[in-house]
Image (cartoon, grey):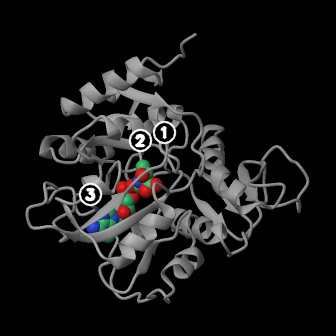
């Protein structure tokens, strides 16, 4: 039957109604998406958005992603362009977030966007997230469901670990399919990746048939601030541990099994590695290890997103 958590529910029609009603009342819920679990609230409600920042202890200068069911719902809020249309057609719904300009009369408030003139929008593919969005007449502000600067949750119980009973509803959608966050791409000028993710820059380049900008001047995405994705213990890259109190994360078949060794993918598959990364790091922390050492991960395809997260978690 049920589980040991009083606020984790499996999904059915009754639970859909309950969740939708709770969100309509301005509450915050933990929801599964295909990337990681999110902390969802009415993006048009200032008080709901405030609750999200407070729960996460998120700095006010770090804006949230607004999640929509589909294209039809964004027109009052967002100015679109050709790049967006092409990428939407190819990848949505799916694990990609677009930075676009906010319309003058947009119902998205300045707290969501940290006073920027732009908005991050995403159309999640997960069937539970979509069922909830479809039943609402507002989009959902939904950052990853972790305390600011921590690891994104990839299971309902991870969300519970972060917020305990501060959430009334966490919907259990099983382990997140991708296990790492969406790609964030700025489309307000020459398209530029702000956060590498599930959809690679190569695929985006092919779709748009242009070269992406790699301008690195100022930090445009506050989530790109260095300290982020931290498991709460030191992470050391490209080194092996010298004792049993420290865990070791590696990729492929290079090392023999040991108690403190954790493999991201025996088959050397980068999607599998990405989907295991946060799960393994959380597990290592739970087991009481004091440090995490990580061997080199190939820097191609999804390896680029993995190395981005590892670098930030190590800083
Ligand atoms: O996969 C995902 O994107 C997950 C799921 C739940 O959808 N969400 C997620 O949200 O990762 P969050 O808040 O953890 O990360 C959002 C990132 C942050 O780095 C934030 O700074 C950036 O998007 N962002 C949001 N609005 C922005 C804007 N207007 N301009 C630039 N960056 C923005
Ligand atoms: Mg996050």
| Mark carried by residue 59 | 3
Left or right: 204 as drawn, with respect to 241: left
- Residue 122 x %, y %: 38, 57
Q: Which mark is residue 127?
A: 1
Place of residue 160 in the rendered image (x, y in percent of width and height, measured from the top left): 45, 31
Are the residues flagged by discs 2 and 1 in contact, CB closer than 8 Å? yes
Circle on res. 313: none
Q: In the drawing, does residue 44 fall left or right of residue 4?
A: left
Name the outermost residue toward the left. 105
Looking at mark 1, is its residue's CB closer than 8 Å to ligand 1? no
Residue 135 image offset from top left, x and y in percent: 30, 34
Identify the residue at image location x=46%, y=51%. Answer: 150
* Residue 174 in the image: above or below residue 46: above
Q: Is mark 3 within 8 Å of ligand 1?
A: no
* Numbered label attached to residue 130: 2
For this rendering, which residue is in front, 168 or 67? 67
Describe the element under mark 2 as helix, strand or loop.
helix
Mark 1: give few (<14), some (14-19) or many (20+) Cα within 10 Å.
Answer: few
Mark 3 or mark 2: which comes first in sequence? Answer: 3
């Amino acid at each position: 039957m049920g589980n040991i958590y009083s606020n984790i529910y499996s999904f059915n029609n009754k639970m859909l109604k309950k969740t939708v009603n709770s969100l309509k009342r301005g509450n915050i819920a933990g929801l599964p998406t295909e990337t990681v679990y999110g902390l969802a609230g009415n993006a048009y409600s200032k008080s709901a958005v405030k609750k999200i920042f407070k729960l996460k202890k998120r700095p006010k200068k770090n804006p949230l992603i607004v999640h929509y069911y589909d294209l039809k719902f964004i027109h009052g809020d967002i100015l679109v362009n050709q790049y967006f249309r092409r990428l939407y057609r190819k990848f949505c719904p799916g694990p990609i977030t677009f930075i676009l300009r906010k319309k003058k009369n947009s119902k998205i408030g300045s707290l969501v966007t940290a006073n920027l003139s732009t908005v991050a929008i995403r159309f999640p593919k997960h069937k539970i997230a979509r069922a909830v969005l479809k039943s609402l007449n507002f989009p959902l502000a939904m950052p990853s469901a972790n305390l600011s600067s921590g690891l994104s949750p990839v299971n309902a119980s991870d969300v519970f670990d972060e917020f305990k009973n501060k959430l009334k509803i966490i919907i259990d959608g099983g382990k997140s399919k991708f296990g790492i966050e969406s790609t964030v791409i700025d489309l307000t000028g020459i398209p530029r990746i702000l956060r590498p993710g599930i959809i690679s820059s190569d695929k985006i380049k092919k779709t748009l048939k242009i070269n992406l900008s790699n301008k690195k001047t100022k930090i445009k995405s506050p989530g790109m601030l260095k300290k982020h994705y931290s498991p709460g213990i030191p992470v050391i890259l490209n080194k092996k541990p010298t004792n049993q109190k420290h865990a070791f994360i590696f990729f492929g078949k290079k090392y023999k099994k040991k108690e403190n060794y954790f493999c991201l993918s025996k088959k050397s598959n980068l999607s599998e590695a990405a989907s295991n990364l946060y799960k393994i790091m959380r597990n290592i922390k739970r087991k009481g290890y004091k440090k995490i050492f990580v061997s080199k991960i190939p820097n191609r395809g999804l390896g680029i997103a993995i190395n981005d997260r590892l670098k930030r978690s190590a800083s």
